Image: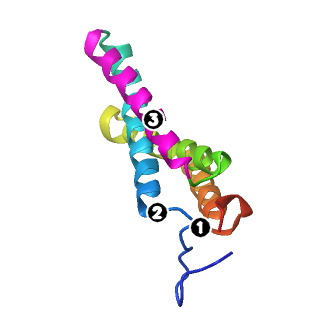
């Protein structure tokens, strides 16, 4: 693993730019919006919730595709799915009053830890 000088922060994989991380971040946020709107569409069905879901997922996949220009698909999907799970759980707590218990928090923590390990130490990351 290649680390930035005097820091424990991984360097950007060869050929990748900060924009590839931005594309992946946008993809994650849009996936969380789309998934959160699934709950809204269930509670209050209608044109707009379904439209938001369709646009969010479609645009999320488009931005994920842009990040694949420089990152391996396994890494991109692991980050997208893992962070999506954690953020959707948080969305459920904030917007829908859902509860997360100790086991759920532990599982989400393990998912985030897995994403960090993949991105920081795995050969998958391209570092």
Q: Is mark 2 on a helix, strand or loop?
A: loop
Q: Which mark is residue 17?
A: 2
Residue 10 position within the rendered picture, expressed as x and y whole percent measured from the top left: 57, 73
Q: Residue 107 carries which label?
A: none
Residue 120 position within the rendered picture, expressed as x and y whole percent measured from the top left: 62, 68
User: Which residue: 32% across, 17% down?
Assistant: 51
- The residue identified by callout 1 is 14
Q: How many marks?
A: 3
Magenta-highlighted residues: 46-69
Q: Quadrant of the C terminus?
A: bottom right
Given the current orientation, which residue lies at the most extreme bottom position? Answer: 6
User: Which residue: 71% across, 64% down?
Assistant: 122
Q: Is residue 86 above or below residue 97?
A: below
- The residue identified by callout 3 is 62
Let me know if residue 100 appears in the view: no
Between the C-alphas of marks 3 and 2, the distance is: 17 Å
Q: Residues within 10 Å of mark 1 (few under 14, many from 20)?
A: few
Q: How crowded is mark 2: few (under 14 residues within 10 Å), some or many (20 or more)?
A: few
Quadrant position of residue 34? top left
Give the main secondary structure of the magenta stretch.
Answer: helix
Let me know if residue 41 appears in the view: yes
Q: How crowded is mark 3: few (under 14 residues within 10 Å), some or many (20 or more)?
A: some
Between the C-alphas of marks 1 and 3, the distance is: 22 Å
């Amino acid at each position: 693993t290649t680390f930035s000088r005097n820091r424990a922060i991984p360097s950007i994989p060869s050929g990748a730019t900060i924009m590839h991380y931005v594309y992946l971040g946008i993809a994650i946020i849009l996936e969380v919006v789309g998934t959160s709107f699934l709950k809204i569409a269930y509670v209050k069905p209608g044109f707009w919730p379904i439209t938001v879901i369709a646009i969010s997922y479609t645009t999320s996949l488009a931005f994920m595709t842009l990040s694949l220009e420089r990152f391996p698909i396994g890494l991109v999907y692991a980050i997208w799915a893992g962070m999506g799970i954690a953020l959707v759980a948080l969305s459920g707590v904030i917007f829908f009053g859902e509860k997360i218990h100790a086991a759920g928090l532990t599982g989400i923590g393990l998912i985030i830890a897995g994403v960090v390990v993949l991105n920081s130490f795995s050969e998958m990351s391209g570092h």
